[in-house]
Image: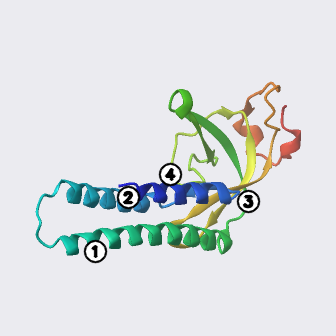
């Protein structure tokens, strides 16, 4: 029942070990494998049958070995995918922040929006009129559907004591150097 926690640990290791912001991380496969192993273990725990006990034990051992293999393979594939990722041409984007969750489970989601409203991470959001940070970023496309976003330059520092003045679309998506945008 606890072996799916190993899959969560593998996902955390990938998140913490790669310095670029993750776009697509294929965590759905990890969750599907974890739920499958947990369902199998729960089914075996509630079973009262004494038939083929050795086969059921072998099945559980195989599920645990498979869980370890999937966790190690996920970390290895993500690392090699990041190492061999192909970078797109750098482009100007708005850096948008959105908070999700409450209390200790609060997290900030960062996305990078192009001038036409598409997101560097993938997807679309209605174009915003202004934002508080403009970046020069590029998308890294790796094998097996992994993607990352690398920020090369940011319009301002992220110090907590600064006042953030909004940056208009005309300023961000122009030829103006990022360092000269309003602070």
The structure residue drawn at horizontal position 31% and vertical position 60%, both measured from the top left corner, is 36
Pick whichever of labels 1 and 2 is earlier in the sequence. Answer: 2
Say which residue label 1 marks.
Answer: 58
Say which residue label 4 marks.
Answer: 123
> In terms of secondary structure, where does tag 1 sit?
helix
Q: Are marks 3 and 2 in contact (CB under 8 Å)?
A: no
Q: Which mark is residue 74?
A: none
Q: Residues within 10 Å of mark 4 (few under 14, many from 20)?
A: few
Q: Position of residue 75 (x, y in %)?
A: 56, 67
The Cα–Cα distance between marks 4 and 2, rounded to whole angstroms, is 27 Å
> What residue occupies the far right of the structure in this picture?
180
Say which residue label 3 marks.
Answer: 90
Position of 3 relative to 171 (above/below): below
> In terms of secondary structure, where does tag 3 sit?
loop
Position of 91 relative to 172 (above/below): below
Q: Are marks 4 and 2 in contact (CB under 8 Å)?
A: no
Say which residue label 2 marks.
Answer: 34
Q: Are marks 3 and 1 in contact (CB under 8 Å)?
A: no
Figure quadrant of the C terminus: top right
The structure residue drawn at horizontal position 49% and vertical position 54%, both measured from the top left corner, is 8
């Amino acid at each position: 029942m606890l072996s799916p926690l190993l899959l969560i640990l593998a996902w955390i290791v990938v998140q913490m070990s790669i310095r670029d912001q993750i776009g697509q991380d294929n965590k759905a496969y990890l969750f599907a494998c974890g739920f499958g192993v947990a369902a199998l273990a729960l089914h075996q725990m509630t079973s009262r049958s004494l038939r083929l006990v050795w086969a059921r034990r072998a099945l559980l051992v195989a599920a645990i070995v498979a869980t370890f293999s999937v966790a190690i393979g996920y970390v290895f594939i993500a690392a090699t995918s990041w190492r061999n990722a192909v970078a797109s041409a750098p482009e100007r984007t708005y850096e948008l922040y959105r908070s999700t969750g409450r209390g200790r489970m609060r997290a900030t989601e960062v996305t990078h929006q192009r001038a036409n409203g598409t997101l560097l991470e993938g997807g679309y959001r209605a174009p915003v009129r202004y934002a508080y940070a403009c970046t020069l970023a590029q998308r890294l496309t790796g094998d097996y559907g992994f993607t990352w976003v690398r920020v090369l330059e940011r319009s301002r520092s992220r110090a907590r004591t600064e006042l953030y003045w909004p940056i208009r679309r005309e300023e961000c998506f122009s030829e103006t150097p990022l360092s000269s945008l309003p602070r």
